[in-house]
Amino acid sequence: MKIIPFKLFLLIFVMGIFLFTSCVKDEDTASEEVNFSSDNSMRAAKTDNVAEGTFNIIEQAFVENETGGRGTTQFSLFPNCTEITVGMQGNVFTILLDFGDSCTLNNGNVVSGSIFLEYGPLVSGTYTVNYTFQDFVFNGNGVSGGGSILYEIANQNDNPQSTVNESITVSFPNTTVTGTRNGTRVSEWVEGVGSGTWLDNVYHVTGNWQTVFTNGFERSGEVTETLVYKTSCRWVVDGRLEVSQDGVTAAIDFGDGECDNQAIFIYNGQEYPFTMN
């Protein structure tokens, strides 16, 4: 099947929603029209991308500065433009990541502002980490709010695992619309543990979340096939995410493990390959 650009895939989705709505209205004049907007969908997708990229920063900072990683990291995610301050007040540990006015991380993401982490001692093999954002910007998108992470040194598979409870708000350039994402994200670190570099890290991610925008638009997402992230790759490389918006459900299939920007949008039994921007 021919690869189609992302904007064209959105247009096809809009047309599909329109046809679906028209049929419903023909059968039942009391049915409400589906209010679908490609701008809303693109903002929702961007919110997911910003959230995942930000959580990767938090998790990597915690690993590099705690859990036995302090001083042993051979190749850090954070370049010299990141000022990292590690502190301790009683039995509470803190990590402040200060990115200044602009800092390009070693994976290519551009950030500014700061992220503050605080956590207590290891209890029964787990840490509870609270995080907050302070004027933080990720690739031009503002991030505020925070949440908590339950970090397990080893789960039933003997892999480190983090469970994130999130409530973050993302703002976008050139619009007053903001989106707030609430949900739970579970990340299992399956490859690269203890290697001293982030380049070989692989994570399996599950969970579900809902994004609500100030213009009234809502979208929910649920991982139905485990998502696979490689920190050396800019894109999700495997897994499937089911998304629901405006009463319509579709899915995104991210591929078979290869690091590329190709994915498949699945709606109403039809598959539309597209390129992730």
Image: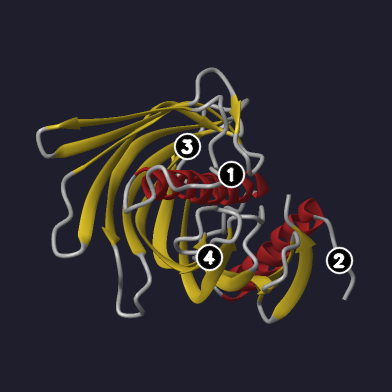
For the residue pair 241 and 151, the one nearer the viewer reads as 151
Q: Is residue 248 visible?
A: no
Question: How far separated are the C-alphas under marks 2 and 3?
Answer: 30 Å
Q: Farthest residue in the right direction?
A: 2
Give the residue displayed 61% in from the left and 34% down from the top.
Answer: 139
Q: Which residue is mark 1?
A: 43
Mark 3 element type: strand
Closer to the N terminus: mark 4 or mark 2? 2
Q: Which residue is mark 3?
A: 170
Question: How far separated are the C-alphas under marks 1 and 3?
Answer: 9 Å
Mark 4 element type: strand
For the residue pair 152 and 276, the one nearer the viewer reads as 152
Few, some or many C-alpha atoms within 10 Å of disc 4 (few <14, some 14-19, many ≥20)? some
Closer to the N terminus: mark 4 or mark 1? 1
Q: Which residue is mark 4?
A: 243
Question: How far separated are the C-alphas under marks 3 and 4?
Answer: 19 Å
